[in-house]
Image (cartoon, rainbow, N blue to C red):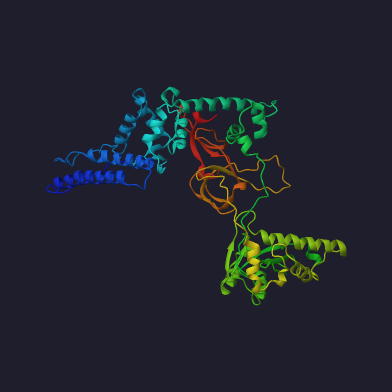
Amino acid sequence: MARRMALVPEELAPSYYTKTAETGVHDIESQIENLLQESKYSDDAKAKLLSQLLIKYQRVINEPRPPVRVTIEETKEQETPKSNTVEEPILRNIILSVPVNFQKFIPPIVEKLKTRSYSWNEDGELTKDDESYKNTNVIDLFSYLMRNVKKGFEPYGFSVFWKGINEIKIPTRWIGNQKEEEKTKHEKKMDRVLKTAYYDYANPASFGGVKKLATSTKVPYHEAKRWLMSQDSYTLHKPVQYKFSRMKTLSYGINDLWQYDLVDLQHLAEHNNGFRFLLAIIDIFSKYAYVIPLKSKTSVDMRSAFEKLLQKVKPKNIQNDKGKEFYNAKLQSLFKKYNINHYSGEGEHKASLIERFNRTLKNKMFRVFTYRKLYKYDDILQSLVKSYNDSEHRSIGMPPSSVTRDKEQQIFKKLYGYTWKNSKVLLNMGDLVRISKAKKAFQRGYLPGWSDEVFRVSKVYSAYPTTYELQDLKAEAIKGRFYAEELQKISKRSDDYWHIERVLKTKGRGRNIEYYVKWKGFDNRFNSWVKAAWMK
């Protein structure tokens, strides 16, 4: 961060400088003294805070000398030299913190890290892409990297820092920590062994799962799994999980929340007086259902069907999928008239209860068709709905038609009054993931079941079951929440290859040629210029 300069009257300059130096030093010395006497912090916490205060102390005592009189020539434009006032004292301390024979490597390592957007802020905390990693200390990180530490724990944030060190590919002789150097050599060896086995077509473990690869290569299971997480041929084709615990749709009483949907029966219209659709509605709390036949799904017919029902009973909230027929002006004005909050769900199971009811109703209808040997339902539709409402519903332990206000507390306890389980957090903020395409069961299992595009976990909700919010790689939020089973953690380094879908433009000649490309699985926002030398 460059220093800012300001012009002040000559008579004020000496007093301003005196106040800044003396007061600043005194304040920091007081903070250091108070910190050393403070009993509520552990020794490790004190050491970390003290290190940050010492950085500030050195920055203050190294304040520039009092300003001198300067003459500004209007005819010449002076260029203000850049200053690394934040970096210089910290860099000096980093160099002093490492063994003498490794000090010469610090400046080139720092410069290489900058090319990968790694640096530090004024408090000496590690930064990546201008984002600070709180409670980290670059002096500790470099010191641990350069010292042959045989015991003890690595400093906080070292995994992020070590990732940057691996990205810049410095010579191993620049690293004094033999433990980390040996770890790097080991990882390279494992990479060779696993790659040889996995991509050998004749090998029994080729293009298989974690267990086969680990057994065949005699590599520990967790290392084989970690390696496969970085291979597109594995992550894109990993089996998709469909059945897992999901969050319950919460309703606080009768008619608190309805879900609704349209059942498409156009192929049976000629047998049922022209009725082409069924408007199906279910009360989430009582499981009570309403079904209204429609000849079309126009805004007029939809509003008419809803209004007849709402004159008798109405909900506080109503939910549906994103069908355009549900977002016409006439229907929205009707919901507004009755003060009903209308919204849509996200995800494949956005309105799962109404979809489950639709399957139950259609199952009954088609059994009747088989029995009667005709596809007519309009004369018995309400009887089938009554049959459903009068049948005991497993989730509430009674028929929907028997649910009354005085039974709400009993039903609520049965629906939601379970003991909360401990939720296991499988992903962390910043993890890179693919999203399940959530294919239907009858689709070919050998086709890729996961998105080509890679996303980053931006928020974790630890309620049971744990859910996650995502961002794309341009930091734009992805709508909705996702379960861990819908996500697959992957490993991608910044120097990994990414697949190009097609080349859109070309510029330059010879060694300076560049291509404007569209990346496979990513939308046009990610299109970018790449040098020919970067392509494989």
Q: Where is residue 191 in the image (x, y as percent from the top left)?
A: 57, 27
Please give left or right for residue 114 compared with residue 228 in the image. left
Q: Residue at x 61, y 64 (%)?
A: 319
Q: Where is residue 305 in the image (x, y as percent from the top left)?
A: 68, 72
Q: Where is residue 278 in the image (x, y as percent from the top left)?
A: 72, 66
Q: Which residue is drawn at 68% across and 40% down?
A: 447
Please, is residue 134 above or below residue 189 in the view? below
Of 269 and 105, which appears nearest the observer?
Answer: 105
Please, is residue 342 above or below residue 156 in the view? below
**Residue situated furthest bottom in the rendering:** 311
Q: In which quarter of the image is the C terminus?
A: top right
Q: Quadrant of the N terminus?
A: top left
Q: Which residue is drawn at 74% across and 65% down?
A: 276
Of 529 and 287, which appears nearest the observer?
Answer: 287
Q: Residue at x 72, y 71 (%)?
A: 401
Please give left or right for residue 190 compared with residue 121 in the image. right
Q: Where is residue 310 in the image (x, y as percent from the top left)?
A: 64, 74
Of 445 and 486, which appears nearest the observer?
Answer: 486
Place residue 376 in its image quadrant.
bottom right
Place residue 306 in its image quadrant.
bottom right
Viewer can see residue 77: no
